[in-house]
């Protein structure tokens, strides 16, 4: 039986590796390429790898506890099943120094199933729907016992939106784009860990879009690949304070990878009680470009909507 | 922990080093330039992409402000540059023209885009 399974798996792998694919796994809609954002998800599905995502946050002193800081070392792997349907897994290794106690260990695992809806090319409008599942008790028991990570799983139906402003009549505003994400997190035990709304938005200015579709500015090559942006991410639990961050920064778009860096500024007083201003940096790889015939293509070269 | 740092960085570096030269083909530059105004009508346009493109699946058209085709329908990849697409134009009166391109890079990724240029105004 085991041998039969291995043979079937090997055959499937051969078929998958050998099958031609015409997929474009970037989140492209009309003239617009929606880049991978750092504190929220982009509105498309793709074959991508974020590794590493490093987040540094100072932790203010509270009561008898001294100040400290935390550092997360995260990854996310996005894999397309069909051209428009994808899954993602992400996790991070959490460390905390000072601030009552030193901690380190793996965070809980998170998985996402996401489907990209047909894009409206002329208006650069792209939307996806997905479900995010956070698996409690898959992380470090030390972190769970310290309350640093949750001990209750939750499931979050999520809507992702992206709108490029390429249809504006003012040329220099056309490189602007907005993206958004709205989730309702349903806790497995709401009496222990409340349900919550999570929402996020980004405002981006794509210099590549300016150069390719509006006006060639003859900028230095480095500047021609920059996307300055600001992201705002908030979580509003049914019980407890709303917290979140404002994250201004930039993305640098190379042919097969992207580098992003943003400041993480507490968005309100409740957030400032838990963290100071930190930063996040991320290396992001376009697997559809790096490994187009293996990991970088859909398992099935189909599109649910076509 | 230090070992995990090294592993993650080494894996990321390995991916980066293993990256082949092929990726999505985006417009690098064009002649006439994107959004430019040229004093006299060009006889042809040339589009340079960031990657080599497939001749059989890569094309471009040019339309005037009324949406009428003004190109000669002879879009082709330059013989001496697999990343350059060329297209002949009919005589153009002053006006605004839109270039529509649609290309497939040699690793089969499809990209498309538009831009405008002006003649004599």
Image (tube, rainbow, N blue to C red):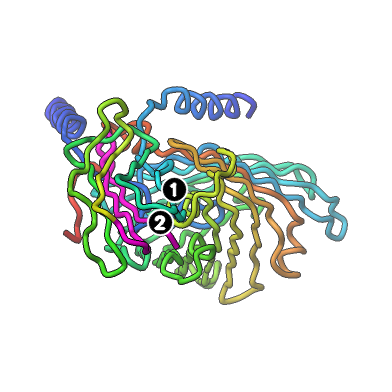
Q: Is residue A297 visible?
A: no
Q: Disc 2, disc 1: CB below 8 Å?
A: yes
In depth, the one of B1 and B17 nearer the eye is B17
Neighbor class of circle 2 (other Cα within 10 Å; few <14, some 14-19, many 20+) is: some
Q: Is residue A241 one of those drawn in magenta?
A: no
- Label 1: which secondary element: loop
Residue A34, position in %: x, y? 44, 55
Residue that label 2 marks: B117
A164 left or right of A248 in image: left
Q: Is residue A157 above or below residue A105?
A: below
Residue lying farthest to the right in this orientation:
A64
**Residue B33: mark in rendering:** 1
**Marks 2 and 1 share the same chain:** yes
Residue A155, position in %: x, y? 42, 63
Q: Write the start and end of the magenta stretch as one range.
A: B92-121
Q: Quadrant of the C terminus of chain A?
A: bottom left
**Residue A197: mark in rendering:** none
Residue in the picture at 65% in, 40% down: A104
Q: Quadrant of residue A21?
A: top left
> Total number of numbered labels?
2
A299 left or right of A223 in image: left
In depth, the one of B29 and A271 nearer the eye is B29
Q: Is residue B113 visible?
A: yes
- Does label 2 or label 1 sit earlier along the sequence? 1
Q: Quadrant of residue B50?
A: top left
Residue in the picture at 35% in, 63% down: A128
- Label 2: which secondary element: strand
């Amino acid at each position: 039986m085991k041998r039969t399974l291995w043979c079937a798996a090997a055959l499937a792998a051969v078929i998958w590796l050998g099958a031609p694919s015409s997929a474009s796994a970037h989140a492209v809609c009309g003239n617009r390429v929606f880049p991978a954002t750092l504190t929220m998800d982009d509105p498309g599905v793709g074959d991508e790898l974020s590794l590493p995502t490093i987040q540094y946050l100072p932790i203010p002193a509270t009561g008898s506890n001294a100040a400290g800081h935390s550092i997360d070392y995260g990854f996310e792997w996005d894999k397309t099943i069909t051209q428009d349907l994808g899954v993602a897994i992400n996790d991070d290794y959490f460390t905390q120094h000072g601030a009552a106690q030193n901690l380190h260990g793996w965070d809980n695992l998170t998985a996402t199933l996401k489907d990209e809806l047909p894009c409206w090319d002329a208006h650069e409008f792209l939307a996806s729907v997905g479900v995010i599942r956070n698996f409690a008790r898959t992380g470090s028991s030390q972190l769970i016992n310290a309350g640093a990570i949750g001990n209750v799983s939750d499931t979050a139906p999520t809507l992702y939106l992206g709108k490029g402003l390429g249809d504006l009549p003012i040329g220099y505003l056309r490189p602007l784009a907005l993206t958004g994400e709205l989730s309702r997190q349903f806790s497995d035990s709401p009496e222990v860990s409340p349900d919550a709304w999570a929402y996020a938005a980004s405002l981006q200015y794509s210099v590549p879009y300016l150069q390719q579709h509006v006006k060639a500015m003859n900028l230095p090559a480095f500047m021609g690949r920059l996307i300055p942006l600001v992201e705002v991410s908030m979580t509003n639990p049914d019980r407890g304070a709303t917290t979140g961050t404002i994250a201004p920064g930039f993305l640098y778009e190379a042919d097969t990878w992207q580098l992003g860096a943003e400041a993480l500024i507490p968005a309100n007083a409740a957030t400032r009680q838990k963290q100071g201003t930190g930063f996040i940096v991320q290396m992001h790889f376009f697997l559809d470009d790096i490994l187009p015939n293996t990991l970088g293509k859909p398992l099935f070269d189909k599109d649910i909507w076509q | 922990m230090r070992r995990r740092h090294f592993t993650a960085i080494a894996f990321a570096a390995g991916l980066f080093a293993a990256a082949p030269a092929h990726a999505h083909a985006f417009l690098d530059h064009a002649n006439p330039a994107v959004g430019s105004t040229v004093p006299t009508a060009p006889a042809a346009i040339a589009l340079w992409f960031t990657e080599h493109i497939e001749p059989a699946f890569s094309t471009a058209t040019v339309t005037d402000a009324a949406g009428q085709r003004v190109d000669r329908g002879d879009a082709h990849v330059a013989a001496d540059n697999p990343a350059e697409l060329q297209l002949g134009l009919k005589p153009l009166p002053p006006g605004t023209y839109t270039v529509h391109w649609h290309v497939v890079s040699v690793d089969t990724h499809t990209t498309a885009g538009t831009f405008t240029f002006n003649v004599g105004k």
